[in-house]
Amino acid sequence: MRCKLLNVAVAALLIPVASFASAEAKTAAMKLSDNTVKIGVLTDMSGVYSDLGGQGAVTAVQMAIDDFKAQYKPKFNIEMVYADHQNKADVGSNKVREWYDTEGVDMVTDVLNSGVALAVAKVTQEKKRVVMFVGSASTRLTDQDCTPNTVHYAYDTYSLANVAGKAIVKNGGDTWFFLTSDYAFGHSLEKDTSEVVKANGGKVLGSVRHPLNASDFSSYLLQAQASRAKIIGLANAGGDTINAIKAASEFGITKNQQLAGLLMFITDIHALGLPTTQGMLLTAGFYWDRDDETRKFSKRYFDKTKRNPTMVQAGDYSAVTTYLKAVQAAGTDDAAAVMAKMKETPINDFFAKNGKIRADGRMIHDMYLVQVKKPSESKYPWDYYIIKSVVPGDEAFQPLSVSQCPLVKK
Amino acid sequence: MTAIFDIPIQALMAQLMLGLVNGSFYAVLSLGLAVIFGMLNIINFAHGALYMMGAFLAWMGLEYLGIGYWPSLLLAPLAVGLFGILIERSMLQWLYKLDHLYGLLLTFGLALVIEGFFTNSYGVSGQPYSIPAELTGGFNLGFMFLPYYRGWVILASLLVCFATWFGIEKTRLGAYLRAATENPQLTQAFGINVPLMVMLTYGFGAALAGFAGALAAPVIQVSPLMGSHLIITVFAVVVIGGMGSILGSIVTGLGLGVIEGLTNLLYPAASNTVVFVIMAIVLMVRPAGLFGKEK
């Protein structure tokens, strides 16, 4: 009995020593934790935004991993896990915490839904991993809520406002009324767009906030109609935008007022059809039919999914590739080292030309002002946009001089 | 312009009108739920999925077979009703003797399977379905522009609701049906085929959901999620009206639509919670619901 007790006591004493030793060994001998880079795709798999990312995002990330393996022959393994956050911040952040704590996930990407993204950013900073937001929109992610572990990739609410919003005001749409999705994303988009409208001499007459997944938009639209604003700004996304546009045309609102879909994806245009959406000015971070490279990627993607990629799905591919390149170049999956590597390396692929990740984590690349084609102008399936102008990244995104991010040295 | 509490009377009237339109959908959907619960004691969580199926069948009919809106309005509910009968015969009929919970779990599972199937095949962005040519345009009511189609929604729903109420409360068949639920053994002893009645009732409830779906197809995007967004509210309507009460679900459906419309105007942020606040208050004052009978 005494002998047993003694054994236990000795063992108890040894545990901390042993774990300390193994931790030492880890940092010394292995630059890559368990020789595997594990990527988590956190997205909306079945809800209102699942066509923007969802299964398509998982496919895009898998393509990126396969292509990277084939092209760069890395010495480490690459694995992918994915999960549905159901558009709930608590579900998303708990899943990510679990991934970091027990499954050895190194990087999380996609994260549609800004509400979820803000929660995930905090967990990622606490656990010292990397998160690359592609689907989420709120500028807060790289502004007042920036972290050293965050990269924000495809677009944000500032650039949406600054590209299409500005163009609409300059075309004479100088009075606005907003229909805003009532959570972090909608608020952010409304705020950023209002500022652009005011800065360009326009006026904001009012706004109404609706819940995510509102089933009927007619009552909000009548309020927008009563405001007599020239432009009704839709600060929402996915199914909400689609239903709002549908109801607006039914109520004859589009005869006297113009709708501005502040965040519309090509899948939304596909779902609504060109007769309802023609002429709309939109901001895009990616368009499949822009050049040979984008067409080549999109063709491969289309063969797997029967849809063309949204800017989120294409961005997921590019973000994962950027991350894997940085891991290989740095020889480690340590978050600080990989982040430093990513921030010093320009990004050149089908998604971005001379893209760069700034100190605040914002990935700067060209944005496109596009106009939806008339049905008669569309020559083949998914031929939806005319690229009106290319807005260089430094103009499209929020300048560092006004950033509230503490990582930015002024 | 006249105003009440700083709100122009025109805006108020317009919201009341729209509330009535949305209330019509609530009424038809909750009616189906009430019929199924009242007669079969099944809490039919698949109702939202059946509603979505109705809309999708209308869309598929047009897309693949060229069947227009008007035939679809009849055919889609019929197909959904048959699907309901299939569910009842193959699965539900074994659950009547068990606790409510089993029926709820089975139908909830079915809803997830049906929605998953459509999401997988068509994606969530949905499919556009145009308003039939006869009903494009609208009335100018002075205080608002009411699209003809929305007017038609109110009319069609009220007709269907009235017919259902009449059929169940005033006809011989309805009397058999009520007898069959009250005392199945005794009713069977009188030579009435009770399982057949029950099967047809579930089929009819499902068809009502399908009808609401086909009716909704032109006004909201036909999407696999359209049912799940609505079903919780509709359940609240049924609970407020009194589980199983036909008249209760019709009146509450329309009433809550109007209240929701007003909330949209006065305090939009609460528009998706107001129904549940009312539900809580009603349950505190009248646990059996407004029109329910305490057992």
Image (cartoon, helix red, strand yellow):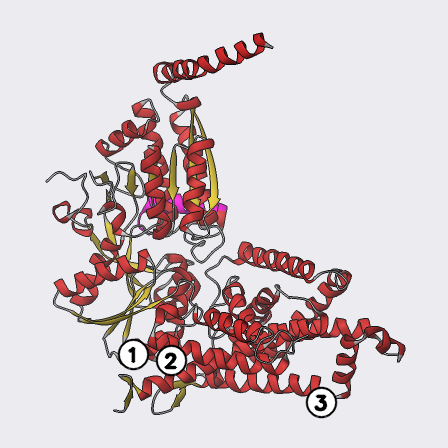
Badge 2 density bin: few <14, some 14–19, many ≥20, Cα 10 Å: many
Relative placement, left or right, of A164 versus A385 is left
Rounded to the nearest whole Å, what is the CA distance between mark 1 and mark 2? 10 Å
**Circles 3 and 1: CB atoms closer than 8 Å:** no
Relative placement, left or right, of B193 versus B43 is right
Magenta-colored segment: predominant secondary structure? helix
- Point out residue A204 in the picture as x, y percentages from the top left corner: 19, 70
Q: Which residue is mark 2?
A: A251
The structure residue drawn at horizontal position 48% and vertical position 59%, both measured from the top left corner, is B124
Q: Nearer the viewer, residue B243 or A183?
A: B243
Which residue is outermost to the top? A3
The structure residue drawn at horizontal position 34% and vertical position 77%, both measured from the top left corner, is B265
State the extent of the magenta-drawn residues as a range.
A290-304
Instruction: Locate residue A30: give its quadrant.
Output: top left
Relative to residue A408, is residue B197 depicted above or below? below
Residue type indicated by callout 2: Phe
Q: Which residue is mark 1?
A: A225
Residue type indicated by callout 1: Gln
Rounded to the nearest whole Å, what is the CA distance between mark 3 and mark 1? 45 Å
Which residue is outermost to the left? A410
Q: Which residue is mark 3?
A: B170
Q: In front: mark 3 or mark 2?
A: 3
Residue type indicated by callout 3: Lys
Relative placement, left or right, of A194 versus B47 is left
Chain ID, mark 3: B
Q: Nearer the viewer, residue A379 or B230?
A: B230
Disc on res. A239: none
| Residue A302 belongs to magenta span | yes
Q: Say if labels 1 and 2 share a chain.
A: yes
